[in-house]
Image (cartoon, grey):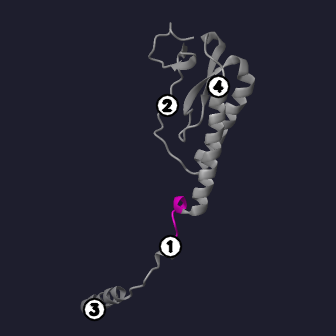
């Protein structure tokens, strides 16, 4: 009985080694990131985000910074793990125009991250402690800088 079992297992093992099925790599499923449709769609969405952030930055830089009291900042963008990707300074007098664009960009980036399953370092981007005017441009002051320099 023991010998029959050994012979049966040997025959099955040898039979399974003989079946060499040739698999065409073209018929295997492809990673979604390698599909041309996904790459084209992702590139198109990325270009829309890029155009919108350039528009926001142009709008934010449209004024000369002479007095930090005339400026504000907002969180912009969305990291895949959550939270803003950065902060942007803008003149208060265009707040009604720029804030909806910032919110729209943030929502679009969040949807982009979800749609394409993106990941990031998940580090929190801390808000600036204020704004300084340097050579006519608004510069965000990091949390480490002196609060007396900030707005």
Residue 137 location (% of width, % of height): 57, 19
Residue 56 seen anywhere in this rendered image of the structure: yes
- Mark nearest the camera among 4 and 1 is 4
Tell me the tag on residue 124: 2
Report the residue marked by disc 4.
Answer: 60
Q: Quadrant of the N terminus?
A: bottom left
Mark 3 or mark 2, earlier in chain:
3
Comes first in the chain, label 2 or label 4: 4
Mark sitting earlier along the chain (1/2): 1
Which x, y percent locates residue 55? 66, 34
* Residue 106 in view: no
CA gap, disc 1 to disc 3? 36 Å
Indicate which disc residue 28 carries.
1
| Structural distance between the alpha carbons of marks 4 and 1 | 49 Å
The region drawn magenta spans 29-34
The mark that comes first in sequence, 3 or 4, is 3
Determine the residue positioned at 32% across, 86% down: 13
Of residues 31 and 34, which is closer to you in this image? 34
Residue appearing at x 47%, y 34% in the figure? 123
């Amino acid at each position: 009985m023991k010998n029959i079992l050994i012979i049966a297992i040997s025959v099955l093992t040898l039979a399974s080694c003989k079946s060499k099925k040739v698999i065409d790599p073209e018929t295997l499923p492809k990673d979604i990131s390698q599909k041309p449709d996904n790459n084209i769609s992702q590139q198109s969405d990325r270009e829309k985000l890029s155009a919108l952030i350039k528009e926001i930055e142009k709008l934010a830089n449209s004024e000369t910074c002479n007095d930090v009291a005339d400026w504000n900042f907002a969180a912009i963008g969305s990291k895949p793990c959550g939270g803003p990707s950065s902060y942007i300074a803008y003149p208060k007098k265009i707040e009604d125009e720029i804030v909806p664009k910032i919110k729209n960009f943030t929502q679009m980036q969040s949807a982009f991250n979800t749609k394409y399953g993106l990941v990031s370092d998940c580090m929190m981007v801390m808000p600036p402690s204020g704004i300084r005017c340097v050579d006519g441009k608004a510069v965000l002051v990091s949390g480490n800088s002196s609060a007396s320099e900030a707005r």
